[in-house]
Amino acid sequence: MLALQKRNLIRRGIFLAFLIVLGIFVWSVLVFFKQLKREELAKMEIWVQAQSELLNIDSQSAINPVLLAILEKNTTTPMILFSVRDSLYEGKNLKEKNFSQEKLKALTRTFEIQNEPIDVYFENKLYERVYYGDSSFIQKAKYAPVVIVLVVLIFLLILYYFYSISKSNEQNRLWAGMAKETAHQIGTPLSSLVGWTEILKAEGVDEDYITEIEKDIDRLENITNRFSKIGSVPKLEKGNLVEVATTAFAYMQQRGSRLIKFSVDTSVDSLECMLNKDLLNWTIENLVKNAIDAMKGRGEIRLQITQNQKYAILKLTDTGKGIPKSRFKAIFKPGETSKRRGWGLGLTLAKRIVEDYHHGKIRVLHSEIDKGTTFAIFIQKVKS
């Protein structure tokens, strides 16, 4: 639990650091953009001043070539000159050449939103008003922060995706190694038990005792077989899912408390699917065990078997303490458990068996606190 809390704190810290860096970046871009706007304003003020001086030059005086150079070199800033005397609009540096007066007037409103217009005076009277918009460079610079942020986010998502896959593969290798080592460790004393059983038979021990011992030995061999298959691709064979599910359910019923009511509801006798009986048995037993724990040994467990056009559907319902909706997906992650003991791998293995091996689906279909939970398993039917 402490390790999980520590990991969550690290994740939050990384996310907070990312937000801070992103905020600094956006702030820097905004400062840069404002600086561009100030330079654009200064350039336009120089242009307007040159225009005003040119208008106020005496007809007999020589025209300063610097003024003409200033007026001619500004070819990037789109502008509209409104003549106060004639009430006419003239466009400069616009993408389209043949704008009507109505379109130019409408465009002035757009420019006025972008930048405050500048007045030009002739003989101390308002001669014309200059409306100007953002240059093509500034217009492109507007979208630069968004593009950069999107690129960074996509890059981070790709990194996280590959990190998740790498971590998942590492965990899978660890579980597979633990499972195979468990199977190996069980195998040695199991072989000895088989030998001792033969000795007991030779000694004439009560056959009822030997029968019960052999049942437990078969059970241990089955468990060993299950663990040995984790980490390798199991062989799937055509089988009757109804028979497999009801057999596993009946086995848990025999070993369950008398205070728990077990019931089976199925409208079909046979559903042919490609499956591995040992692993699917294990999945159903895990779900039943979780249901028994959730009910604290008292309540009702119901197995319902239905089908649709594509899937055979197993629904396991209990009357236990329920699961919060926020944890419907989290409970399938390794280490997620509400029990004081256990590693929280039961549902993780169940998900792996159903989805990775049988190419089906497993999910919490419904749950209410203190009322119960329904798990659903979907296995593809064999096409007839």
Image: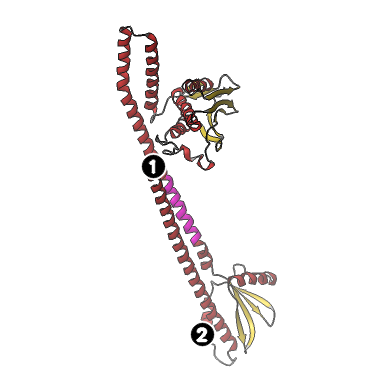
Q: How many labels were placed on the picture? A: 2
Residue drawn where x is 51% and y is 78% of the image:
42
Q: Quarter of the image holding residue 45?
A: bottom right
Residue at the (68%, 77%) spot, across then down: 88
Please tell me which residue lies in front, 175 or 132: 175
Q: Which residues are magenta?
A: 145-161
Q: Quadrant of residue 357?
A: top left
Question: On the rendered structure, is 26 left or right of 171?
Answer: right
Residue under circle 2? 65
Q: Percent x, y for residue 230?
A: 39, 29
Residue 167 is tagged as 1
Mark 1 belongs to which amino acid? Lys
Residues packed near mark 1 inside 10 Å, few (<14), some (14 to 19) or many (20 plus): few
Q: In the image, what residue type sits under mark 2? A: Pro
Check the image and report above or below for 192 versus 179: above
Q: Position of residue 171 (x, y in %)?
A: 38, 38
* Mark 2 neighbour class, 10 Å CA radius: few under 14, some 14 to 19, many 20 or more: few
User: Is any part of residue 98 visible from this angle?
Assistant: no
Quadrant showing the N terminus: top left
Of marks 2 and 1, the one in the foreground: 1
The residue depicted at 49 percent of the width and 61 percent of the height is 145
Q: Secondary structure at mark 2?
A: helix
